[in-house]
């Protein structure tokens, strides 16, 4: 299955000779209107792909920053249906930037696989990452997403051996998300030295681009990862800016988008700098 916007974006990045920058934000954080303003500003700030989290009360893979963001999103009333509406509102003004939903299986199960897949596609969603849905249990959801031409993007981790990577690669499309550190989001920092061989293994097993996330906090670290991965994902560091804006009683979009620019600029310049030094 081909997912046009995702495949087209990675083809364009390859042609430019650079990694992509993937920005993760939480739907409804801190309010629906501010979340939409952030979404609409992300492409101009340098985001090549957007990951839109849908709030869930028990986000087990997340560290405290995204846990708090999920609670703020829930407080703002952003259900899964509201998240799809937010994606649709973004898509009205942007026909090209891939949008990936990221979250947990429980809300999708409650929604219904077919209804969710159909409405995700209608909302302009290109792919879905379901953190707690292992391949062995993903058949019905994958069938529904395939029918709607929405990618199921799987996670690979430092503990995924070659046999497991083959299972992860089955019926995965768009890209593979490599979790660069053991543990939850926003706690440890990714290390490019250990990421590089892992990215190559995942790429060889799947034949797909590899995006690296969990543990990218600074422009320097983003640039290091961008030299070895097809895309770099930042999330906790962005939702931290929402929390800081609330603490300072300031609007969140300006702070979040400024952080996106600094990280995206580092990713865009990473291979240029490396080429100059070689």
Image (spheres, helix red, strand yellow):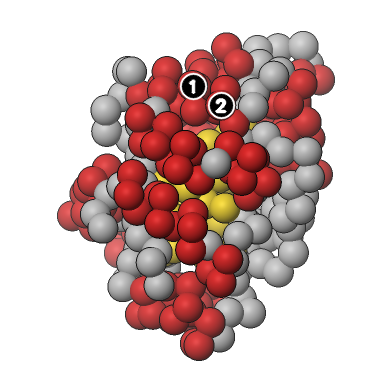
Q: Distance between the Cα atoms at labels 1 and 2?
A: 6 Å
Residue 81 image label: 2
Q: Against 208, is 17 above or below? A: above
Residue 25 image label: none
Q: Against 54, is 152 above or below? A: below
Is residue 196 visible to the viewer in this orientation of the structure? no
Residue 8 in picture, x, y percent from top left = 22, 48
Q: In the displayed structure, does residue 75 sit left or right of residue 172?
A: right
Q: Against 236, is 166 above or below? A: below
- Location of residue 187 (image quadrant): bottom right
Q: Which quarter shows the N terminus?
A: bottom left
Q: Disc 1 marks which residue?
A: 85
SS at mark 1 in the image: helix
Q: In the displayed structure, does residue 60 sit left or right of residue 137?
A: right
Residue 141 in picture, x, y percent from top left = 49, 54
- Location of residue 24 (image quadrant): top right
């Amino acid at each position: 299955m081909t997912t046009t916007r995702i495949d087209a974006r990675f083809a364009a990045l390859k042609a430019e000779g650079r990694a992509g920058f993937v920005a993760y934000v939480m739907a409804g954080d801190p309010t629906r209107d501010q979340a939409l303003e952030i979404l609409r500003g992300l492409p101009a700030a340098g985001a090549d792909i957007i990951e839109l989290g849908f709030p869930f009360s028990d986000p087990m893979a997340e560290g405290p920053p995204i846990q708090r963001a999920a609670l703020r999103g829930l407080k703002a009333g952003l259900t899964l249906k509201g998240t799809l509406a937010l994606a649709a509102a973004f898509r009205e003004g942007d026909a090209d930037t891939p949008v990936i939903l990221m979250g947990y299986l429980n809300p999708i199960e409650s929604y219904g696989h077919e209804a969710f897949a159909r409405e995700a596609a209608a909302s302009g969603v290109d792919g879905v990452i379901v953190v707690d849905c292992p391949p062995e249990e993903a058949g019905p959801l994958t069938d529904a997403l395939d029918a709607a031409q929405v990618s199921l993007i799987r996670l690979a981790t430092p503990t995924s051996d070659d046999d497991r990577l083959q299972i992860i690669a089955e019926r995965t499309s768009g890209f593979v998300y490599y979790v660069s550190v053991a543990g939850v989001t926003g706690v440890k920092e990714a290390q490019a030295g250990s990421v590089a061989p892992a990215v190559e293994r995942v790429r060889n097993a799947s034949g797909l681009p590899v995006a690296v996330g969990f543990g990218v906090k600074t422009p320097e670290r983003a640039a290091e990862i961008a030299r070895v991965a097809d895309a770099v994902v930042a999330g906790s560091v962005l939702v931290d800016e929402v929390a800081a804006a609330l603490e300072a009683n300031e609007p969140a979009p300006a702070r979040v988008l400024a952080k996106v620019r600094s990280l995206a600029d580092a990713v865009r310049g990473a291979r240029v700098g490396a080429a100059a030094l070689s």
